[in-house]
Amino acid sequence: MKQETRKILAEVFDDLTSSWEKEKKVAYGDDLVLLGSNSIFDSMDLVNFISDIEVKISDVENKEITLVSETAFSKQRSPFKSMETLGNFIDELLAEGGGE
Amino acid sequence: MVIAITGSRKGIGCNLAEHYLEQGHTVIGCSREMSDLKTPGYTHFQVDVSDEQSVNEWVKNIRSEFKSVDVLINNAGVASMNHFMLTPTSTARRLMDINYFGTYYCTRAFVNLLRKSANPRIINFTTVAVPLVQAGDLTYVTAKTAIEALTKVLAKELAQFKITVNAVGPSAVDTDLTSHLGHKRLEALLEKQAINRIGTFADVSNVTDFFISPQSDFVTGQIIYLGGIN
């Protein structure tokens, strides 16, 4: 993924996890799992994370993307598997000009 | 406050726009056609709320000027009255598309703008036709019932963003929506109310004022019907 995208993901992740208890906290990494039994997020955290990313990208890149879309669910490999796959998906959406 | 109102070209939507403009708020309205409302503080967009792309384009345009929105009033809606056996399926789908999915698409598109508000509010529109469950109202009642369910579930799902979600259910108000009712049917409707009079725009804005008040931040998932129907 692009470095700018990684920076956005890391900043949003750090903001979201800043209120987590010490034992639960982890550092940002591209390999962090977002979905499934090994996910670092519960469902509410994931909702907040996705929404926060959309807002951050709107503020930083001045572009609107919708992460939860037909495009996302039509992919063979889920973009939400890890930070890496999510970052790559965001780069695709930004290159296309949106997320519909 | 910045208040977005769908279906603001006429009827209750137009009246709510004028009401909040008089209070000094900024109002962003939309409808499928252009609006005659030229009051300073009002911006109008042509949007088809049943078209998700049209709604997303609207919000994209809003975002270029406004960093946040405080209130979303999902007023746009249409009605239909006919026996089930005389209602084309296309009509049923159209009512669901405009009434329910219009509310759904607008809510989804506005959430990120509402999150930036200190007192974010969503107000949906249902109708007294839901509790009255009268023959002839199937397509309208089912679409509005879906909006009521959306209101209650969203109240829980959006609470984490401090967004309250409530609905107002007007009784018959003198608009295009009720103009086809006819005198006899209108009289029969008014008889079912605890207070037997036709509703006014002020009756509706009285409820929306309550919902959007900063003091109402503990009121969510509620449906208020007018005229004493429940």
Image (cartoon, grey):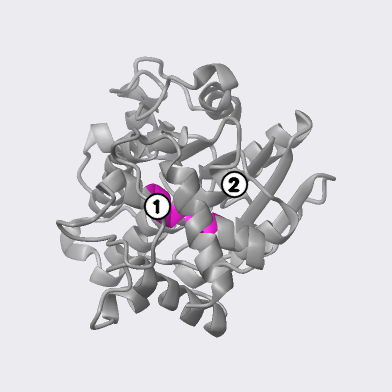
- Whether residue B200 sits left or right of residue A75 in the image: it is right
Q: Give the CA separation, mark 2 to mark 1.
A: 42 Å
Q: Depth check: B141 or A9 in front?
A: A9
Q: Depth check: B54 or A13 in front?
A: A13
- Whether residue B80 sits left or right of residue B46 in the image: it is left
* Marks 2 & 1, CB-CB < 8 Å contact: no
Disc 2 element: strand
Q: Where is residue B205 in the image (x, y as percent from the top left)?
A: 58, 28
Q: Depth check: B83 or B117 in front?
A: B117
Asked if residue A51 lies in the magenta stretch, the reply is yes
The C terminus of chain B lies in which quarter of the figure?
A: top left
- Crowding at dot 1, Cα within 10 Å, few <14 / some 14-19 / many 20+, comes out as few
Q: Looking at the image, can residue B56 be seen?
A: yes
- Crowding at dot 2, Cα within 10 Å, few <14 / some 14-19 / many 20+, comes out as many
Range drawn in magenta:
A48-55
The N terminus of chain B lies in which quarter of the figure?
A: top right
Disc 1 element: loop
Asked if residue B143 lies in the magenta stretch, the reply is no
Residue tagged 2: B5
| Residue at (72, 61) in percent of width and height | B64
**Identity of the amino acid at label 2?**
Ile
What is the chain letter for disc 2? B
| Residue at (62, 69) in percent of width and height | A63
- Whether residue B85 sits left or right of residue B178 in the image: it is left
Q: Where is residue B2 in the image (x, y as percent from the top left)?
A: 68, 41
Residue tagged 1: A27
Identify the residue at the far right of this view.
B40
| Residue at (38, 67) in percent of width and height | A30
- B51 in relation to B139, above or below: below
- Whether residue B213 sits left or right of residue B137 in the image: it is right
